[in-house]
């Protein structure tokens, strides 16, 4: 065997070891107790001596071990479940992706277990721990920002993991999505191309919504490139709603009296900004141009129709399903094929 082949074999062996599921035997070995003691601790912690319990708990934490609640003959049933975790089930942006993903998986006999984290990493970690205890066929997360505990659990599990709706970092396993800074940059470039010079990015819950925050960063960076431009990033601490959009526009007008172009973190906020412009008698797009994000159902039919950025949620769902099904069938992607860029499209309508 030549040196190159040896290195490839070594890397392949390391990867297989990395993806192997942590077992009760591993916990027992690290804690220096018997597997039966570990099993007893998991069922009845008080039945184990405090010293042994402490060592077992340390081993579980160190290895990222999750007990499999699907035991014996039922273990095969676990392969029929795919866990999908989204930030919020109230957010319409993820509905298209989850619906498409569910349809694609159902066609292959797989069922979806849906959870929502409310943009909290601790809540997401709790959901991941629960999902892994049922030995799912795969886990789907939203975005690339997760707690260290979540990453550790998933890497130790050996379960196929797909992170969706975001690219730009190093995925745990596989990723399908797009660059959010590029989305923000596209919105800024579009406004600049329309001759707008006093710009604002209106967003909500950006202290928790990492993806909206990076869209704002991409917008600000592009706006900064123009000579004599003013720009502001304005955040509402609550949910991204129509009401929040009206409040954000009011705040933007207070900060930027000559405001003539806004980009919004989603179409709901953009709709609220349009309503507030109508209440104030501000002509859109003559006085202020408005760009949204999401291309929700109302975007083409509101007055004026909304220029927005379409993230192709259905395509994300199909690509996630393709990666999951391939992994289950033994064709887990390697290298660059683990990351799928679905891109984005700016849809120009009458608001700009």
Image (cartoon, grey):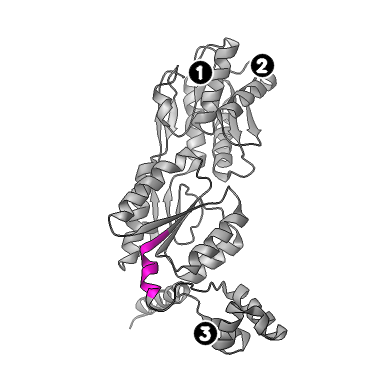
Mark 3 Cα within 10 Å, few/some/many (few <14, many 20+)?
some
Q: Is residue 38 above or below residue 96?
A: below
Gap between marks 2 and 1 measured at Cα? 17 Å
Q: Earlier in the sequence, mark 2 or mark 1?
A: 1
Gap between marks 3 and 1 measured at Cα? 66 Å
Q: Secondary structure at mark 1?
A: loop
Taking the spot 42% from the left edge, 39% from the top edge, the residue there is 311
Q: Is residue 66 above or below residue 199?
A: below
Tell me if I can see residue 228 in this picture.
Answer: no
Determine which residue is flagged by label 3.
Answer: 25
Determine which residue is flagged by label 2.
Answer: 257
Q: Is residue 101 above or below residue 225?
A: below
Q: Nearer the viewer, mark 2 or mark 1?
A: 2
Q: Secondary structure at mark 3?
A: helix
Q: Which range is magenta?
A: 74-82
**Residue 335 appears in which quarter of the rendering?**
bottom left
Of 63 and 67, which appears nearest the observer?
67
Determine which residue is flagged by label 1.
Answer: 195
Q: Secondary structure at mark 2?
A: loop
Spot occupied by residue 256 in the image (x, y as percentages of width and height): 66, 20
Spot occupied by residue 273 in the image (x, y as percentages of width and height): 56, 22
Spot occupied by residue 174 in the image (x, y as percentages of width and height): 42, 58
């Amino acid at each position: 065997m030549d040196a190159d082949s040896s290195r490839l074999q070594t890397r392949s062996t390391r990867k297989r070891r990395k993806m192997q599921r942590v077992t009760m035997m591993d916990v027992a070995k690290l804690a220096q107790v018997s597997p039966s003691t570990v099993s007893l601790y998991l069922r009845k912690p008080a039945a184990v001596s405090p010293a042994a319990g402490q060592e077992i708990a340390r081993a579980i934490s160190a290895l990222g071990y999750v007990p499999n609640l699907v035991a014996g003959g039922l273990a095969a049933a676990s392969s029929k479940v795919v866990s999908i975790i989204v930030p919020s089930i109230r957010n319409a942006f993820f509905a298209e992706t989850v619906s498409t993903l569910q349809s694609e998986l159902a066609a292959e006999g797989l069922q979806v277990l849906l959870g929502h984290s409310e943009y909290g990493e601790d809540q997401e970690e709790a959901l991941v721990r629960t999902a892994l205890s049922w030995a799912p066929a795969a886990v789907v997360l939203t975005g690339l920002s997760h707690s260290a505990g979540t990453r550790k659990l998933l890497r130790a599990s050996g379960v196929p993991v797909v992170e969706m709706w975001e690219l730009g970092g190093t995925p745990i396993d596989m990723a399908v999505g797009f660059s959010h800074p590029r989305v923000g940059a596209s919105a800024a470039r579009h406004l600049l191309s329309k001759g707008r010079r006093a710009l604002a990015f209106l967003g909500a819950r950006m202290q928790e919504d990492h993806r909206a925050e990076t869209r704002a960063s991409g917008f600000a960076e592009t706006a900064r490139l123009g000579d004599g431009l003013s720009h502001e990033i304005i955040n509402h601490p609550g949910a991204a709603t129509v009401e929040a959009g009206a409040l954000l526009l009011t705040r933007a007008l207070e900060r930027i009296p000559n405001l003539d172009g806004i980009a919004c973190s989603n179409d709901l906020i953009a709709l609220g900004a349009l309503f507030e412009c109508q209440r104030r008698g501000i002509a859109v797009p003559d006085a202020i141009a408005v760009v949204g994000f999401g291309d929700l159902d109302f975007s083409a039919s509101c007055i004026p129709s909304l220029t927005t950025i379409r993230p192709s949620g259905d395509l994300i769902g199909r690509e996630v399903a393709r990666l999951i099904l391939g992994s289950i069938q033994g064709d887990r992607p390697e290298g660059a094929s683990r990351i799928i860029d679905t891109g984005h499209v700016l849809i120009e309508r009458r608001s700009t």
